Amino acid sequence: MDFVKGYHDTRLPYDAKREVLWKTLCDVYFQPLIPPDACVLELGAGYGHFINNIRCARRIAMDQWEGLRKYLQPDVEALVGCVTDLSALKDNSLDFVFASNLFEHLKQRDFSVVLQQLHTLLKPGGTLNIVQPNYRFAYREYFDDYTHVTAYSHHSLADFLSAHRFRVIDCQPRFLPLTVKSRLPAWPVLIRLYLALPFKPMGKQMFLRAVPEKKPLPSRKAD
């Protein structure tokens, strides 16, 4: 936990620009994908910028960082622990799973464990939604973050999901700029304009949306 605490103190300190960005992203882009009665889980929730700005029946945030709790709204459920252990959640309970800048921090075997669990946790029609750096466009900066251990392009991430029986229904190679650490202002009107552009200048983060291919599997909770 000392390592995680040090990461948020140095590499990822709180930045108010991120809150503006994610509030706008949720309002304009992600909220229309989420029904009012949905149960939403954010993996690697960090400061809760996404989950705090989503409106739905049940909101759950998970991160191994203890500091998560103090940034969440009162009605957001906090799970502090590793994303490879989702045993606190019930099968067929999730409608929408979101992960931003998470899976590049995991080894592939751990990512596989997460995907295996999501097969049983997601309801039929439920989706896994991933935003993270696209190595094809961010290769110069990718390993400036010392906690990045695995590199994915939009092709390799889509293939990895397919290999784990997830069908990719949306793949956007250039979805967002790599970071908010720039001199550009985080104005909602500019973010809305950027999302509407057919070509995303400086777009180095990708967005993939996938649904599990439901096949008979041994129940995870029967073990």
Image: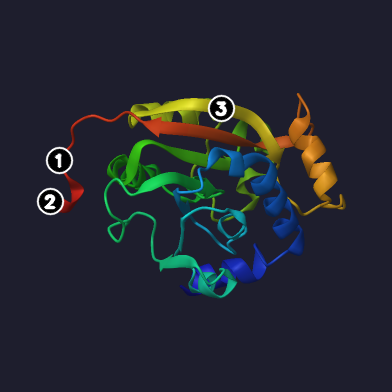
N-terminal label among 1 and 3: 3
Q: Are marks 1 and 2 in contact (CB under 8 Å)?
A: yes
> Left or right: 134 with respect to 183?
left
**Residue underneath mark 1:** 218
> Left or right: 30 with respect to 164?
right
Asked if residue 164 can be seen in this view, the reply is yes
Rendered view: 95 above or below 210 = below
- Element type at mark 2: helix
Residue at image location 63% in from the left, 44% down from the top: 142
**Residue underneath mark 3:** 171
Give the residue type at disc 1: Pro
**Residue underneath mark 2:** 222
- Element type at mark 1: loop
Q: Are marks 3 and 2 in contact (CB under 8 Å)?
A: no
Asked if residue 223 can be seen in this view, the reply is no
How far apart, in angstroms, are the residues tagged by discs 1 and 2? 8 Å
